C-alpha cells in the first residue's frame, strides 16, 4: 500500500484515497492508484487443468487479463460470483513488461475512503497474500500482497 508521507517543508501528514473492496469473507484495502477500473462481472474464458484460484481470462479494452479469486489464492474454499460481483482491474506492480494489468473478483462495489496517519493496525490473523490488517473507521480490512499475486501468476505460467 502506498505509504503516508510528509511534505518537505512541513510535518503535516498527507492523506491518500483508499478503496475498501468487499469479498465474500473479508474486506481488502488498496490505494485507489492501484485500481485501473471496476467493470461489471462477465464470465471468464476458462481452460482445463489450471489452478482453482485462476478463474480464467476476461477481455478488457482489447486485452485478455487473468482473473483471480483472492479467497482461493489465500487458501479459502472456492466462492461463486454472487449477484453483486464485479471485476476489479488492477495496475500491475511487478515491472513485467508484458503484464500491465490483472483482474480480481470482488463481491460488490468498492467504497472510497480517505486514509491518514490515524489508520490503526488490527490484531487479526493474516492469510497467504495478506500483508497487514487495519482498522479503517471500524471496518477491519486486509492489505493484499499484489506483488505476491502477480508472482503467483508468473510461477504458474499464466503471465
Image (cartoon, helix red, strand yellow):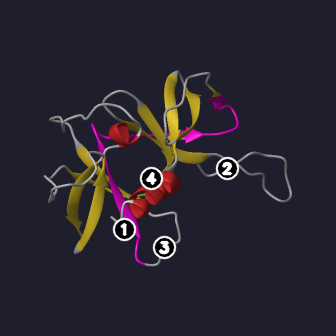
What's the residue at 35%, 37% (across, down)?
A: 71
Q: Residue at x 37, y 60 (%)?
A: 156
Give the mark nearest the N terminus, 2 or 3.
2
Q: Which residue is mark 3?
A: 96
Q: Nearer the viewer, mark 4 or mark 2?
A: 4
Classify mark 3: residues with Cα within 10 Å, few (<14), some (14-19) or many (20+). Answer: few
117 left or right of 129 in image: right
Labelled pair 1, 3 in contact (Cβ < 8 Å): yes
Residue 155 spot, x, y in % from top left: 43, 61
Q: Residue 94 lies in magenta, yes or no?
A: no
Q: Residues within 10 Å of mark 1 (few under 14, many from 20)?
A: some
Residue in the picture at 65% in, 28% down: 120
Which label number is shown at residue 149?
Answer: 4
Q: CA distance from mark 2 to mark 3?
A: 22 Å
Secondary structure at numbered mark 1: loop
Q: Which residues are magenta?
A: 98-120
Q: In the rendered view, would you say 145 is above or below 159? A: above
User: Which corner quadrant holds the C terminus?
Assistant: bottom left
Amino acid at each position: 500500500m502506498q505509504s503516508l508521507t510528509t511534505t518537505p517543508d512541513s510535518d503535516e501528514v498527507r492523506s491518500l484515497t483508499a478503496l475498501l473492496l468487499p469479498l465474500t469473507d473479508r474486506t481488502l484495502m488498496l490505494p485507489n492508484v492501484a485500481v485501473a477500473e471496476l467493470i461489471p462481472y462477465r464470465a471468464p474464458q476458462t481452460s482445463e487443468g489450471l489452478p482453482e484460484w485462476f478463474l480464467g481470462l476476461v477481455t478488457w479494452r482489447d486485452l485478455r487479463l487473468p482473473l483471480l479469486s483472492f479467497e482461493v489464492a489465500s487458501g479459502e474454499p472456492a466462492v461463486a460470483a454472487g449477484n453483486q460481483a464485479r471485476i476489479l482491474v488492477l495496475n500491475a506492480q511487478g515491472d513485467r513488461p508484458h503484464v500491465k494489468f490483472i483482474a480480481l473478483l470482488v463481491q460488490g462495489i468498492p467504497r472510497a475512503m480517505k486514509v491518514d496517519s490515524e489508520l490503526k493496525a488490527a490484531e487479526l490473523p493474516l492469510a497467504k497474500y495478506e500483508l497487514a490488517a487495519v482498522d479503517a473507521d471500524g471496518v477491519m480490512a486486509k492489505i493484499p500482497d499484489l506483488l505476491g499475486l502477480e508472482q503467483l501468476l508468473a510461477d504458474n505460467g499464466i503471465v
